[in-house]
């Protein structure tokens, strides 16, 4: 079902009022936008709400904590004035691209405002950064990725009240949203910027969209030309990170299989019913507060769980992964090998000794990915035994002056233990 379809149907009736769309923003956000637009108007600068923010408002989806504004005018001058008159802090600025990112210091809390000069782009080669030049909004929308993102609403202020112009939709984005279709704007779109393929994957999975035939044909040609292979490792890794923040990363992988691009993300990556079921179990545990480990880290572990040893090694060598994630991938491989022996362990003390070296994340991934007696024992360990792990181990006692030998073993046996309920963690080291 299309997200927010009921609200979308209401908004897209022939007589719907765009002001109703913007009115769905919170009062604090509307007040801040009014202040920004008033300052821009004083500098004869036009401001447009643009892109995915408009799309989501049309769908009745919460706009979140990011607002994208297109600026017909000098972004640097506008930014400088905004920083002196409003409770905003500069996060990033790229003068050559005419962009700036601001974040609120007060109300609304932690709202990110992205300003971008309206422009045209020229890609001299596939998958490289474009050459840009200023242009009016009508030309700026042409450079967008998909019709459903080439939407804009001009914002005005009159007597400190925020007002809107008509919805600007030159490529039929509203029609495509209603039909659940994903359409690129021109035949060179994937050639110019192959990351659009990966962004399209996330959009299609999140909103249940299907490629229109012409876009599907262009995608096939782009894959045959291996444009994704021209992207830097960093750009693909960034798209992978964004995928982990989707409502269902497994659904993105399923769509990637359908589009035949999974191998470009990670050799051996693929969707399976087991992955979808494991994700549902994990989502339930996260939603009910049963676990507090990073959701993105756990989803990443699930996606790489089915990789064989060679694919896992290649994945670690290909991407420059944060230490925590690299460790997770390695630990998952080690736990794979340990699973057959877990059921042979008779005593909980031996189980604790076998599983203690592994991180919470690795243990949880295996527990939710597997549906076996061994994974049940891992779950029992994480929930019941790990919280009782000694606050001090043998190395800690040696640092306190206890010499190796029988005395050390006896001291370790009676070391203080944590008795708080799971997910209490070992507190060694402060």
Image: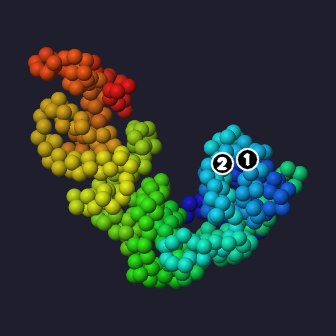
Which x, y percent locates residue 28? 73, 45
Q: Marks 1 and 2, Cα distance to the nearest angstrom?
A: 7 Å
Which x, y percent locates residue 61? 61, 56
Of marks 1 and 2, which one's residue comes earlier in the chain?
Answer: 1
Q: Is residue 381 above or below residue 402?
A: below
Q: Disc number at residue 83?
A: 1
- Mark 2 lies on a secondary structure that is strand
Q: Considering depth in this image, is 45 or 108 the residue closer to the camera?
A: 45
Other-residue count near label 2 (Cα within 10 Å), few / some / many at <14 / 14–19 / ≥20: some
Q: Considering depth in this image, is 135 or 287 the residue closer to the camera?
A: 135
Q: Are marks 1 and 2 in contact (CB under 8 Å)?
A: yes
From the image, tell me which residue sits under label 2. Answer: 90
Q: Considering depth in this image, is 81 or 367 the residue closer to the camera?
A: 81
- Could you tell whether 1 is left or right of 318 in the image? right
Q: Is residue 192 above or below residue 118?
A: below
- Mark 1 lies on a secondary structure that is helix
Which quarter of the figure is the C terminus placed in? top left
Which residue appears farthest toward the right when viewing the image? 159
- Could you tell whether 8 is left or right of 385 in the image? right
Which x, y percent locates residue 260? 38, 73
- Could you tell whether 315 is left or right of 95 in the image? left
Number of numbered discs visible in the structure rendering? 2
């Amino acid at each position: 079902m299309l997200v927010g379809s009921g609200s979308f149907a209401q908004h897209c009736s022939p007589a719907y009022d765009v002001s109703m769309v913007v009115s769905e923003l919170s009062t604090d956000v509307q007040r801040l936008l009014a202040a920004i637009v008033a300052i821009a108007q004083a500098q004869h600068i036009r401001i447009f709400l643009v892109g995915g923010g408009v799309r989501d408002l049309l769908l009745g989806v919460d706009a979140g904590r990011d607002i994208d504004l297109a600026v017909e005018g000098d972004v640097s001058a506008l930014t400088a004035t905004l920083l002196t008159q409003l409770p905003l802090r500069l996060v990033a600025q790229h003068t050559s691209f005419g962009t700036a990112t601001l974040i609120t210091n007060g109300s609304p809390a932690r709202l990110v405002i992205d300003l971008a000069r309206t422009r045209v782009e020229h890609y001299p080669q596939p998958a490289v950064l474009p050459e840009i030049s200023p242009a009016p909004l009508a030309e700026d929308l042409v450079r967008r990725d998909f019709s459903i993102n080439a939407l804009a609403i001009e914002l005005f202020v009159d007597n400190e009240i925020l007002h809107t112009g008509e919805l600007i939709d030159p490529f039929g984005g509203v029609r495509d949203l209603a039909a659940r279709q994903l359409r690129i704007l021109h035949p060179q779109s994937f050639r110019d910027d192959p990351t659009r393929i990966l962004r399209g994957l996330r959009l299609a999975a999140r909103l249940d969209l299907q490629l229109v035939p012409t876009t599907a044909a262009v995608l096939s040609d782009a894959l045959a030309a291996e444009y994704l292979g021209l992207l830097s490792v960093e750009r693909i890794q960034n798209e992978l990170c964004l995928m982990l923040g989707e409502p269902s990363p497994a659904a993105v992988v399923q769509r990637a299989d359908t589009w035949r691009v999974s191998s470009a993300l990670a050799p051996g990556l693929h969707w399976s019913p087991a992955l979808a079921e494991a994700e549902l179990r994990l989502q339930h545990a996260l939603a009910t507060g049963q676990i507090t480990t990073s959701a993105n880290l756990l989803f990443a572990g699930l996606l790489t769980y089915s990789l064989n040893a060679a694919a896992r090694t290649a994945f670690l060598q290909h991407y420059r992964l944060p230490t925590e994630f690299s460790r997770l991938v390695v630990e998952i491989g080690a736990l794979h090998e340990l699973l057959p022996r877990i059921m042979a362990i008779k005593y909980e003390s031996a189980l604790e000794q076998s599983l203690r070296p592994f991180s919470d994340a690795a243990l949880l991934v295996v527990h939710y990915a597997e549906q076996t007696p061994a994974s049940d024992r891992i779950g029992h360990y994480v929930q019941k035994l790990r919280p009782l792990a000694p606050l001090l181990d043998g190395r800690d006692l040696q640092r306190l002056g206890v010499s190796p030998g029988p005395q050390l073993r006896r001291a370790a046996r009676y070391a203080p233990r944590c008795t708080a309920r799971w997910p209490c963690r070992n507190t060694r080291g402060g």
